[in-house]
Image (cartoon, grey):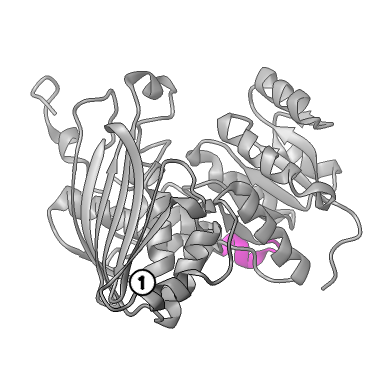
Amino acid sequence: MPAPTSPRHVVVVGTGGIAAAHARGLRALGDRVRIVAAVDVDPARVAAFAQEWDVPRTAGDLAEVLADERVDVVHICTPPSAHVPVAEQALAAGAHVVVEKPVALSLTETDRLLAAEARSTGSVAVVSQHRFGSGVQRLTSIVADGSLGRPLVATCLTQWYRPDAYFEVPWRGTFEVEGGGPTMGHGIHQMDVLLSVLGPWEQVSAMASRGARPTRTEEVSAATVRFAGGALASVVNSVVSPRETTILRFDLEHASVEVHHLYGYGDDDFTVTPAPGHEEEAQRAWAREPRGVRSSHEAQFRAVHDALDAGATPPVALADARSTLELVAAIYRSAFTGRTVRRGEIGPDDPFALRMDGTGAPWARVPEGAGA
């Protein structure tokens, strides 16, 4: 399918901090897109966003814009609790959706959105920008074709720091509006990369804790994940780590590949360590394309619009994002029940399908004043 002769009309819903990354990424696409409207319940915030990014129209409700404006793509940058209802509105109008992570607060909500997508001519792409840097794309192809052997061990660390003031924003630190703590809202990007490289997970055993921040969600989770291909991964998510770091490491049979960064990586952030006797093999594998692309919203948005031009499903498809969200739900279920959880075990009637805290976080059952 040829590229459209006129720019796609884009609406940005939610004009808080992450919306700037969306506007910046869309602007980098040049004449391929045009932001025709911005929507937010806060009139001052949406007006400031529109002025900064030269957006011609503002509104307090997406329905106002959909009623009398051509809308091709809706970018959803609201707090997580609003993702699904806004996406359903857009899909009902036949628009495509690009939604920030987490796509929904629960597996139940995700399945509801999958049903809405099936009824629509539009599609849903979930922001997972770390899949689109050239380093991860190169690594994914190396693992897929086995050129450096099977993956055996992996490490996935999201160790970040958020002070008390971070949780003063009313929707943060709650299962009801944010959906969870660092497992849901911070480490989900790295876990998404982990799954995109290693494939389906099989079972997980996890623990979680809190007590240092004014939050009802966890502040730390730690999990061991077994993958269908046999690899074992250690996963840590934290918002109480003063020396912030993001680390993904994959130990393959013939080389270790790791990336150290914080909120985005480039090719220079990767290190490849060959196993003895496999130096040339590792050098040859890592020299392949693609190269030179940083992980970013822009990189994913380019891929989304390339797919739309070709009449294909934009990445990352909602069904793919559900697999990552299922791992998140399984980590909470294991941590809060003390049991190992297998993939597919969380059925539609399971409390952890309805909410990430399921039957309740352990600290929520401790009487007030008795400690965390």
Secondary structure predominantly adopted by residues drawn in magenta: helix
In the rendered structure, the answer to whether residue 232 lies left or right of residue 116 reads: left
Please state which of residues 37 and 353 is positioned toward the viewer in this rendering.
37
Image quadrant containing the N terminus: bottom right
Q: Is residue 197 above or below residue 172?
A: below
54 vs 273, nearest the viewer: 273
If the image is split into quadrants, where does the C terminus sit?
top left
In the displayed orientation, state which residue is furthest to the left.
370
User: How many circles with numbers are drawn on the protein?
Assistant: 1
> Left or right of 75: which side holds 81?
left
| Residue that sits furthest to the right in the current view | 5
Q: Is residue 341 visible?
A: yes
Indicate left or right for 330 with 2 as reference: left
Looking at the picture, how far across and down is residue 81, in whole percent? 48, 40
Q: Write down the quadrant of residue 38 in the picture.
A: top right
Q: Which residue is mark 1?
A: 200
- Please report the bounds of the magenta region as a residue range: 115-122
Q: Position of residue 337 (x, y in %)?
A: 15, 52
Q: Which residue is rendered at x = 74% and y = 58% of the image?
A: 94
| Mark 1 nearby-residue class (10 Å; few <14, some 14–19, many ≥20) | some
Rendered view: 77 above or below 155? above
Picture residue at 37% right of the left edge, 24% below the top: 167
Q: Does the magenta run of residues contain 281?
A: no
Amino acid found under the numbered disc labelled 1: Pro
Visible in this render: residue 344? no
Residue at 73% x, 40% y is: 63
The residue that appears at 71% across and 21% down in the rendered structure is: 48
> Where is residue 8 drawn, in percent x and y?
81, 52
Q: Position of residue 224 (x, y in %)?
A: 20, 59
